[in-house]
Image (cartoon, rainbow, N blue to C red):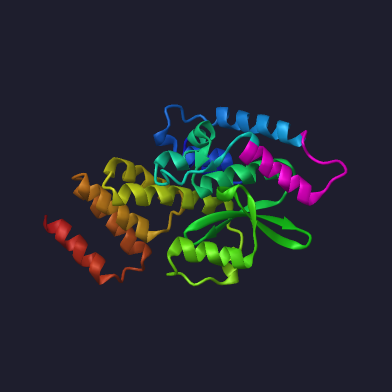
Amino acid sequence: MSLHDYLREDPACRRLAEGAVHCVAPLLEDPDPELVLDQLEEWSSELAARMPLPWDLDEAVERLNIFLFHELGLEGDRATYDDPRNAVLPEVMRRRRGMPIALSILWIDQARRLGFEAAGVGLPGHFITALQLPGGLRFFDPFHGGSEVDEPQAETLVRGATRGRVPFHPELLCPTSDRAVLTRLVRNLHLRFFRGGEWDEALWTATHLLLLEPGDPQTLKERAVVHLKRGEADRALKDLESALHLSGGADEELEQWMDQLRRG
């Protein structure tokens, strides 16, 4: 199944871990997500046997974190943070290291299998998770061992990740949709490949972003740049025409760029 097929079957991307595999399929020798899903089911069975009886919420979350970050040894990769493998779920599970969003996807998957209403929270420069509970939202940071995050700590995370460039406000802690989680996962890779001039990789990441967000003119412009770097002027022009249409047909800079391409 391709990412296109997956999105047709599950447009809300509730099968989040499966979608995360489809999103990075070009980086995998075997893009079939079944091995990942089987492993996640096995983890879930082991974790369920560790749940407290009688039920205790705080202890359940603690045991979830102990299982993932101590018994399995998952951890944030600080040494080689920009390694693309840190965004590739099968590699994260194999190496036991990953970036915040990949570790969060695994945390969300296991929390949901336990019956929690779990979601991602896309802070500027960092990614955490949330549980929707009767008393409201509680936040956790899988990159730092699943430690609980309150509002002041979230502000500290944002300040550190953005070097103070992005002001914090509580609305940043609103949970994001599962489809937006996958979009951010792919965009992280896309920015690495685009800035690094890895044009073959940047082509598929841009294409996957357009599958996830079909109406985004900025990604069309970025893919046009990729096409030009690959010597594909006709395809670049087609993307720019689509971007102009989505922008409402009033982008003078874009029109000038297209005129230059038409003139060769």
Q: Residue at x 44, y 64 (%)?
A: 162
Indicate the position of residue 148 as horizontal and vertical percent values.
66, 56
Q: Is residue 10 visible?
A: no
Q: Is residue 38 left or right of residue 126?
A: right
Image spot of residue 40 (x, y percent): 63, 33
Seen from the viewer's position, the closer of residues 77 and 22 is 77
Q: Nearer the viewer, residue 16 or 215?
A: 16
Work out which residue is located at the far left of the displayed protein and give it.
264
**What residue is drawn where x is 49% and y is 72%?**
167
192 is within the stretch colored magenta: no
Q: Position of residue 235 (x, y in %)?
A: 25, 48
Residue 30 seen in the current view:
yes
- The residue sitting at 24% across, 69% down in the picture is 253
Q: How many marks?
A: 0
Query: In the rendered image, which quarter is residue 251 located in?
Result: bottom left
Residue 72 position (above or below residue 76): above
Q: Is residue 20 left or right of residue 45?
A: left
Residue 120 drawn above or below residue 97: below
Q: Quadrant of the C terminus?
A: bottom left
Q: What secondary structure characterizes most of the magenta part?
A: helix
Residue at x 54%, y 34% (from the top left corner) = 93
Query: Range of the magenta residues?
Result: 49-70
